[in-house]
Image (cartoon, rainbow, N blue to C red):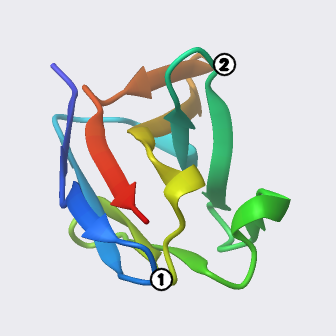
Amino acid sequence: QVQLVESGGGSVQAGGSLRLSCAVSGSIFSINAMAWYRQAPGKQRELVAAITRGDITNYADSVKGRFTISRDNAKNTVYLQMNNLKPEDTAVYYCNVRSDYPIWYDYWGQGTQVTVSS
């Protein structure tokens, strides 16, 4: 059974930093991409950053230059380094892993709260 376990959320002041981690336990035959999404109260879940099998990264415009996504394949872990945090970054952050074999399937973590105060 596959589980995504997130850690690293918390409360910081504006300008601070946090590092989120998402460890994948269980067996996923083929990982196509790993990503972080977030959902603020009253808003839809949005993509924050993604990294593909070939280490191609993609970021939401609102976080470019401040956030960095990376992965450690040996540990089956994806990270999100968040610097210069802003109050508008406050949200629940979700880890996502997309499998592409034998079927396309999205796995989700339970979410971790990030709160940035001004």
Tell me the residue at 30%/30% (across/down): 109
The quadrant of the picture occupied by the N terminus is top left
What secondary structure is found at the residue carrying circle 1? loop
Residue 5 horizontal side relative to residue 37, left or right: left
Where is residue 94 drawn, in percent x and y? 41, 36
Residue 83, numbered label: 1
Residue occupying the point 50% across, 21% down: 41
In the rendered image, the quadrant that contains the C terminus is bottom left
Q: Quadrant of residue 55?
A: bottom right
1 vs 11: above or below:
above
**Disc 2 secondary structure class:** loop
Name the N-terminal-most of marks 1 and 2: 2
Q: In this view, does 27 lie to the left or right of 58?
A: left
Amino acid type shown at disc 1: Asn
Q: Looking at the image, is 35 positioned above or below residue 28?
A: below
Question: 80 or 87: which is nearer to us?
Answer: 87
The answer to whether residue 13 is above or below residue 78 is: below
* Residue identifier under label 2: 44
Between the C-alphas of marks 1 and 2, the distance is: 23 Å
Q: Categorize mark 1 by other alpha carbons within 10 Å: few (<14), some (14-19), many (20+).
A: some
Q: Which mark is on residue 42?
A: none
The residue carrying pointer 2 sits among few (fewer than 14), some (14 to 19) or many (20 or more) residues within 10 Å by Cα, namely few
Left/right placement of residue 8 relative to residue 78 reads: left
Q: Position of residue 11 (x, y in %)?
A: 22, 59
Q: Which amino acid does label 2 sit on?
A: Gln
Nearer to me, 7 or 14: 14
Instruction: Say whether marks 1 and 2 touch (CB < 8 Å).
Output: no
